[in-house]
Image (cartoon, rainbow, N blue to C red):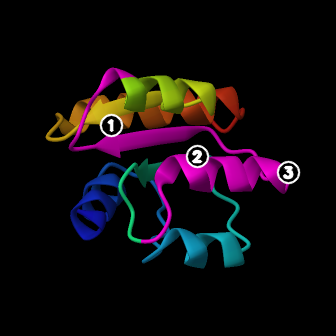
Amino acid sequence: MRRSTSVLLEASGFGTETFDSAEAFLKSSSKACCLVVDIDLDKMTGIKLARQLAQHGRIYPIIFMTGHDSDIVRRQAEDVGAVACLTKPFPAQMLIKAIIKACSREGRF
């Protein structure tokens, strides 16, 4: 999913960075305008990643993806300020619109 999403976004004119784990991203100095994060990660959930980033003053607009949609997941995503919470599979255009919305908030579009 990570590789195909990156290819899609690059083909749509976006720059991308990919990370193989939340922990790897936390160690990075990324200057991303937004994050596209799966809710279900290996050692740390996407929600927990968002909370840790906020605790360290690293605030990003976040677009969550999940294969296990529920009211609880959506509420948790909203609580951490998600721009969108997309249920897989979703149309590519839905992701692109969410990224444009997220980066517009940051003044990058």
Please identify the residue farthest to the right as the structure is shown. 57
The amino acid beneath tag 3 is: Gly
Question: Do the residues under discs 2 and 1 have CB atoms within 8 angstroms?
Answer: no
Q: In the rendered structure, which segment of residues is drawn in magenta?
A: 43-71
Q: Is residue 34 magenta?
A: no
Mark toward the start of the polypeptide (2 vs 3): 2
Task: Give left or right: position of 54 versus 30.
Answer: right
Please tell me whether residue 37 is drawn above or below residue 6 in the rendered image. Answer: above
For mark 1, give the secondary structure: helix
Residue 65 appears in the figure: yes
State left or right for residue 9 relative to residue 78.
left
Disc on res. 34: 2
Label 2, residues with CA under 10 Å away: few <14, some 14-19, many ≥20: many
Image point 50% across, 64% down: which residue? 44
Could you tell me residue 75's position as x and y percent? 48, 23
Residue 11, horizontal then vertical, whole percent: 28, 56
**Element at label 3:** loop
- Residue 78 figure quarter: top right
Say which of marks 3 and 1 sits in front: 3
Q: Earlier in the sequence, mark 3 or mark 1?
A: 3
Measuring 19% from the left and 41% from the top, which residue is drawn there? 88
Q: Which residue is mark 3?
A: 57
Q: Amino acid at mark 2?
A: Cys
